[in-house]
Image (tube, helix red, strand yellow):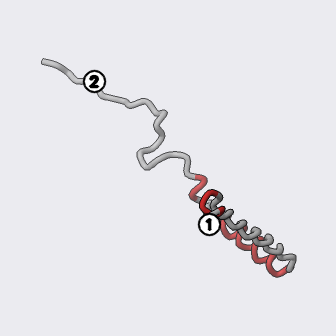
Amino acid sequence: MSSFFNPPKPKAPPPPPPPPPKPEDPAINEARRKEREAAKRRRGRAATILTSGLGDPNQPQVQQQKLLG
């Protein structure tokens, strides 16, 4: 009868897993460094283009005068 008025307590959640160990292997660090340098080289030229395909948007549009008549 006591369980009717007092519902069972929920179970405690499991403890979180421990954080993964950080690799201290020099080969892994060297591979990461090479990957960062390769990424820099890949985006090198794309980062230097400062205008769109339409050209410089700050140039004034030059129109010729039309003769009427």
- Of residues 9 and 20, the one nearer the viewer is 9
> Within 10 Å of the Cα at label 2, are there few (<14), some (14-19), or many (20+) other Cα atoms?
few
Q: Secondary structure at mark 1?
A: helix
Q: Whole-percent x and y of residue 32? A: 75, 73
- Of residues 24 and 19, the one nearer the viewer is 19
Estimate the spatial distance between the alpha carbons at disc 2 and disc 1, rounded to whole Å: 47 Å
The outermost residue toward the front is 1
Q: Whole-percent x and y of residue 22? A: 83, 73
Quarter-of-image position of residue 35:
bottom right
Q: Whole-percent x and y of residue 8? A: 65, 64
Which of the labelled discs sits on residue 18, or is there none?
none
Identify the residue shown where x is 85% and y is 80%: 25
- Mark 2 is on which residue type? Gln
The outermost residue toward the top is 69
Q: Is residue 59 left or right of residue 19?
A: left
Q: Whole-percent x and y of residue 55? A: 45, 44
Residue under numbered circle 1: 42
Q: Relative to 6, is 19 above or below? A: below
Identify the residue shown where x is 20% and y is 21%: 67
> Within 10 Å of the Cα at label 1, are there few (<14), some (14-19), or many (20+) other Cα atoms?
few
Identify the residue shown where x is 32% and y is 29%: 63
Residue under numbered circle 2: 65
Image depth: mark 2 or mark 1 in front: 1
